[in-house]
Image (tube, grey):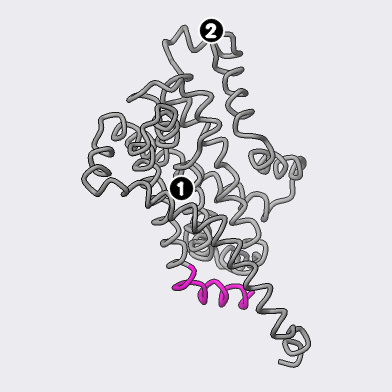
Amino acid sequence: MADRDLLQEPLWLRICVIGAAVLAMALLVLMPLLMVLAAAFGDGFSAWFAALREPDALAALKLTLFTTAIVVPINAVFGVFAAWAIVRFEFRGKRVLLALIDLPFAVSPVVAGLCLVLLFGSQGWFAEALSAYGIKVLFAKPGIVLATLFITFPFVVRELIPLMQQQGAEEELAARSLGASAWTMFRRVTLPNIQWGLLYGVLLCSARAMGEFGAVSVVSGHVRGLTNTLPLHIEILYNEYDSVGAFAAASLLSGLALVTLALKFWLESRHGDDLADTHRRH
């Protein structure tokens, strides 16, 4: 308590700092979002609903959800085992692996899309092999999935690494000493300890996957009704001066993000104490 009192700043300073943070978030985040919603429903609910019932809009929504449904489970599995390997084992090249995991954070999404073009394009490294088997990656769903997968790789693993480091390996060692197999130890000890951190990472990964634009824009080909995700569909409608359709699709994408945010808030409010208790035990 005494340490907290020493760190307590004057009331006027706290008010200024908190007020500046709230004002910045209101101007940069909340206000633009409210303006999008106002523009989406400016012509009424019927116009908003009609814009979303367009075949191209429905196809874009289905492709966005399809891509997210593939990318998120892959990232969840990769994130769990990559974090487990990095935290629990020492091996040559560990720092290189960590750097590679962080690479999507540093590389522009457009550059990531261009890398896929160099690999899978008509003049790419795998062009002949893909052509021989009749497999199309670019300007098709596989390219969109790969681009989104590249961009979202770090989210789950980077959420789990600090959590597993803080928890330590005592419970896992105890389970192995009692005769548990590696799979039993992972299923009964490791996974329950990281389940809420894993879910948190999955929510972040889902939000990023649904909103990805740059890398997908390079590899999709912008084929309406076939390879346009929701962000690409919004861009096309906006460039065609279809403001009603563009803002309606934007509001839908924002709604999906808000659902993710609501789940994140629920997770933190309901299980934040459980996470804190787990950290204290270790």
Q: Main secondary structure of the magenta part?
A: helix
Across and down, in percent, residue 24 comes to: 61, 61
Quadrant location of the C terminus in the rendered image: bottom right
User: In what element is the residue under mark 2?
Assistant: helix
Tell me if 58 is positioned left or right of 237 in this view: left
Residue drawn at 35 percent across, 46 percent down: 40
Pair 1/2: label in front: 1
Could you say which disc has been placed on residue 128 in the image? 2
Q: Residue at x 61, y 17 (%)?
A: 118
Q: Position of residue 261 (x, y in %)?
A: 45, 59
Q: Residue at x 62, y 62 (%)?
A: 163
Q: Is residue 280 magenta?
A: yes
Up-down: is 92 above or below 242? below
Q: CA distance from mark 1 to mark 2?
A: 34 Å
What secondary structure is marked by label 1?
helix
**Quadrant of the rendered image containing residue 50:** top left
Q: Are marks 1 and 2 in contact (CB under 8 Å)?
A: no
Residue 75 marker:
none
Spot occupied by residue 61 in the image (x, y as percentages of width and height):
34, 37
Query: Per the image, is 133 magenta?
Result: no
User: Which amino acid, mark 1?
Assistant: Ser
- Whether residue 255 sits left or right of residue 194 in the image: it is left
Q: Magenta residues, as a range? A: 268-282
Residue 206: mark: 1
When the figure is inspected, residue 39 is found, relative to residue 118, above or below; the finding is below
Name the side, left or right, on which 11 lies relative to 276: right
Amino acid at circle 2: Glu
